[in-house]
């Protein structure tokens, strides 16, 4: 009887430790995501570029689109205004709020 109680207590202890580990890992993952976002904002956010860097950054941003000329035109226009270009080839606009929030007259996104 004592052995059964001991094993039951051990199983409950293992379950509790597993739950605690999951909570800690989830909290650390959230911190890593927030730290990564802050890092990206500091590296790619508004004012992170000089105007002479716009052509090369837009070239990178527009390199994988089939609409290269219009992408370059609007990207450089946005870059000159916002002094930032988001990382990657597509998306990630939240890193650069000015670039993300500039809209056309119709309400669509101005910046690629």
Image (cartoon, rainbow, N blue to C red):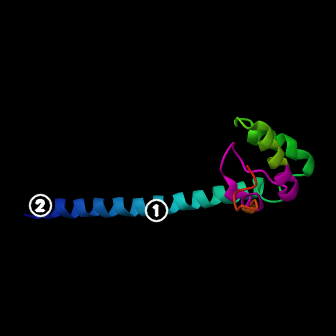
* Outermost residue toward the front in this view: 106
User: Is 84 in front, or is 80?
Assistant: 80
Residue 59: quadrant of the picture: top right
Q: Of the residues under marks 1 and 2, which one precedes in the sequence?
A: 2
SS of the residue under disc 1 = helix
How far apart marks 1 and 2 lie (CA) works out to: 30 Å
**Residue 18 seen from this side:** yes
Give the magenta-colored segment's residue range. Answer: 77-100
SS of the residue under disc 2 = helix
Circle 1 packing at 10 Å, graded few (<14), some (14-19), many (20+), is few
> Which residue is denoted by mark 1 in the rendering?
24
Q: Is residue 49 magenta?
A: no
User: Is 8 in front, or is 76?
Assistant: 76
Residue 4 coordinates in the image, percent (x, y): 11, 61
* Outermost residue toward the left in this view: 1
User: Is 109 in front, or is 43?
Assistant: 109
**Residue 39 seen from this side:** no
* Outermost residue toward the right in this view: 52
Question: In the visual, does 50 lie left or right of 24?
Answer: right
Residue 11 coordinates in the image, percent (x, y): 23, 59
Instruction: Give the label, 1 or 2, closer to the camera.
Output: 1
Question: In the visual, does 39 lie left or right of 34?
Answer: right
Residue 7 coordinates in the image, percent (x, y): 17, 59
Residue 4 bears which disc, if any?
2
Task: Indicate the quadrant containing the N terminus: top left, top right, bottom left or bottom right.
Answer: bottom left
Q: Residue at x 41, y 59 (%)?
A: 21
Q: Residue at x 24, y 63 (%)?
A: 12
Q: Residue at x 80, y 48 (%)?
A: 75
Q: Is residue 86 magenta?
A: yes
Residue 30 coordinates in the image, percent (x, y): 54, 61
């Amino acid at each position: 009887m004592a052995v059964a109680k001991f094993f039951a207590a051990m199983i409950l202890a293992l379950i509790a430790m597993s739950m605690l580990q999951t909570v800690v890992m989830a909290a650390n993952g959230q911190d890593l995501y927030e730290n990564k976002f802050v890092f990206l904002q500091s590296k790619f956010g508004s004012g992170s570029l000089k105007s002479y860097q716009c052509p090369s950054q837009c070239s990178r941003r527009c390199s994988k689109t089939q609409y290269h000329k219009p992408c370059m035109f609007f990207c450089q226009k946005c870059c000159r205004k916002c002094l930032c270009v988001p990382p990657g080839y597509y998306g990630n606009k939240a890193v650069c709020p000015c670039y993300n929030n500039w809209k056309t007259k119709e309400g669509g996104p101005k910046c690629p």
